[in-house]
Amino acid sequence: MSVRLYALDGCPWCEKAADALDDAGVDYETEWVEALHSERNEVKRVSGQRGVPVLVDDERGVTMAESANIVEYVERTLA
């Protein structure tokens, strides 16, 4: 899968990013993360920080955080 969304269940910002991907018809995989920041080692490995959401687009070599940035990227690039 070339697009992955790292997300936390119940996170409104993560839901916003997922909704943008769904609305654009993007095929993506969700990687569910732990609630504790200290246990989000995979998120830190791919993005350099532990916050979510994080979008990884392997095909384009893009990794980004912040739901507003993700939504804009999805609308401009993936839609």
Image (tube, grey):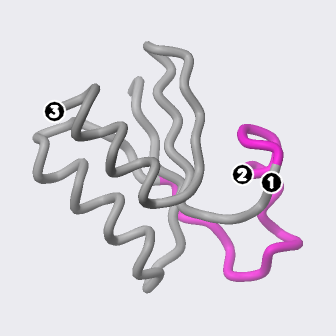
Q: Residue at x 55, y 58 (%)?
A: 66
Give the residue number, with chain letter if any, for mark 3. Answer: 79
Secondary element at image label 2: helix
Q: Nearer the viewer, residue 48 or 71?
A: 71
Q: Is 40 included in the stretch rendered in magenta?
A: yes
Question: Is residue 79 placed above or below 49 in the rendered structure?
Answer: above
Considering every residue shown, the one lying at the far bottom of the view is 10
Q: Quadrant of the N terminus?
A: top left
Q: Which residue is mark 2?
A: 43
- Ranked by sequence position, the earlier of labels 2 and 1 is 2
Is the residue marked by circle 1 packed among few (<14), some (14-19), or many (20+) residues within 10 Å?
Answer: some
Task: Look at 77% across and 61% down and name the residue there.
Answer: 50
Instruction: Specify the segment rendered in magenta.
Output: 31-48
Is residue 15 positioned above or below 17 on the image? below
Q: Residue 43 location, x and y as percent?
A: 72, 51
Q: Are marks 2 and 1 in contact (CB under 8 Å)?
A: yes
Instruction: Residue 9: say if magenta.
Output: no
